[in-house]
């Protein structure tokens, strides 16, 4: 992605090709014999956030980052087979490892979305059509019982599957968010929920409600160190990525947003470890979940070399790190 805005001193501080190569070196060390990916090469490390919840998380993020950079996983065929093995005859995907209870609604939505996204990144499609699985979330209003961070799972699922997002589902989620959005643009008083709202509307091609206010709140919440981890650490593991997405997609190229993104990149590099991976916070264990979100932040900051063109299906690559900023962008003042 060709940069059009100044990135601050961080652009000159690092050999970004080396950062990219060492990141993929770490990812390669996480490959397992069965085609899946461990959270870390450390066999005693059980993962954090997504990688602790489902064994589909790490392989999805490995596949998505490889697709982002035009690379092929060294065991792509085995990884695809690993993912296919997680699909059930009804079309749903289930986790074979991790803390999620495979039959819960959240687990079914999470795993089915990740499975479809990962296969898309690997150039494959599910053996069984998973689209009928989505009915369970809208018959009886089960979507309202899911965490706020799941709102953009639905349009992402359909985008990766290559099917249109049903209008009834779009309207149901839009109404649910509209009834709960606060005047500052946020949901649940947290940047993660606000991110998924912005991601949802970006995927469906509509303007995010109260986008300007959302940008202002996001700028206000940035810490002096460049991060956004202002609540309980377990809740904030993806906050920097989430905030940068909002600023990049909705900020309209405003110089304050560009400066905030540059500071975010500096914070991300504080989370980088000697093994080539990233932790969720400075000084924490490298984790493939953190690698996706931290590297994805650097992609959004337009610091990773070799990304001069955006894949046509960039919107299918997980959480929007490769998507071009929305056009036209909204005004940046509330």
Image (cartoon, rainbow, N blue to C red):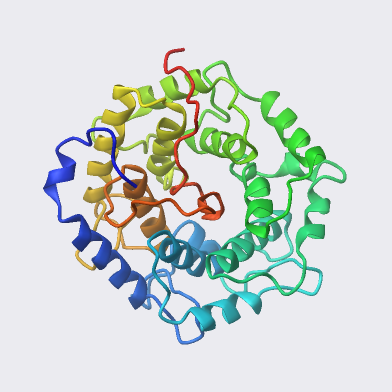
Looking at this view, name the residue that lies furthest to the top. Answer: 334
Query: In this image, 94 relative to 211: left or right?
Result: right
How many numbered marks does the figure carry? 0
In which quarter of the view is residue 262 placed?
Answer: top left
Query: In this image, 61 relative to 253: left or right?
Result: right
Q: Can see residue 149? A: yes
The x and y percentages for residue 62 are 44, 67
The x and y percentages for residue 255 are 29, 23
Q: Answer above or below: position of 133 versus 150.
A: below
Q: Can see residue 226? A: no
The x and y percentages for residue 123 are 56, 70
Residue located 15% across and 56% down the image:
15
Residue located 42% across and 13% down the image:
333
The x and y percentages for residue 291 are 36, 59
Q: Answer above or below: position of 326 versus 39.
A: above
Looking at this view, name the residue that lies furthest to the right. Answer: 140
Q: Answer above or below: position of 263 versus 129.
A: above
In which quarter of the view is residue 113 placed?
Answer: bottom right
Residue located 71% across and 31% down the image:
174
């Amino acid at each position: 992605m060709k940069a059009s805005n100044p990135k601050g001193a961080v652009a000159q501080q690092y050999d970004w090709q080396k950062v990219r190569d060492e990141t993929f070196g770490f990812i390669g060390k996480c490959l397992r014999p069965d085609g899946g990916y461990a959270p870390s090469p450390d066999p005693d490390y059980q993962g954090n956030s997504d990688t602790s919840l489902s064994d589909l998380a790490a392989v999805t993020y490995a596949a998505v980052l490889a697709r982002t950079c035009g690379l092929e996983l060294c065991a792509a065929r085995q990884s695809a087979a690993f993912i296919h093995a997680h699909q059930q005859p009804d079309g749903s995907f289930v986790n074979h490892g991790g803390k999620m209870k495979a039959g819960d609604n959240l687990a079914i939505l999470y795993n089915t979305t990740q499975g479809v996204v990962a296969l898309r990144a690997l150039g494959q499609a599910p053996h069984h059509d998973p689209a009928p699985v989505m009915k369970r979330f809208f018959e009886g209003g089960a979507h309202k019982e899911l965490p706020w961070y799941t709102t953009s799972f639905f349009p992402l699922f359909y985008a990766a599957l290559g099917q249109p997002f049903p209008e009834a589902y779009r309207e149901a989620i839009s109404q649910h968010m509209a009834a709960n959005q606060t005047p500052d643009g946020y949901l649940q008083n947290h940047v993660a929920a606000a991110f998924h709202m912005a991601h949802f509307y970006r995927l469906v091609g509509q303007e995010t409600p109260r986008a300007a206010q959302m940008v202002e709140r996001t700028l206000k919440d940035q810490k002096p160190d460049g991060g956004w981890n202002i609540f309980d650490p377990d809740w904030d593991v993806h906050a920097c990525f989430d905030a940068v997405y909002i600023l990049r997609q909705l900020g309209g190229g405003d110089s304050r947003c560009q400066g905030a993104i540059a500071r975010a990149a500096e914070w991300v590099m504080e989370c980088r470890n000697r093994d080539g991976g990233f932790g969720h916070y400075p000084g924490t264990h490298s984790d493939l979940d953190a690698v996706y979100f931290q590297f994805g932040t650097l992609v959004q900051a337009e610091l990773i070399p070799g990304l001069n063109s955006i894949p046509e299906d960039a919107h299918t690559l997980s959480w929007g790190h490769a998507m071009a900023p929305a056009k036209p962008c909204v005004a940046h003042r509330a």
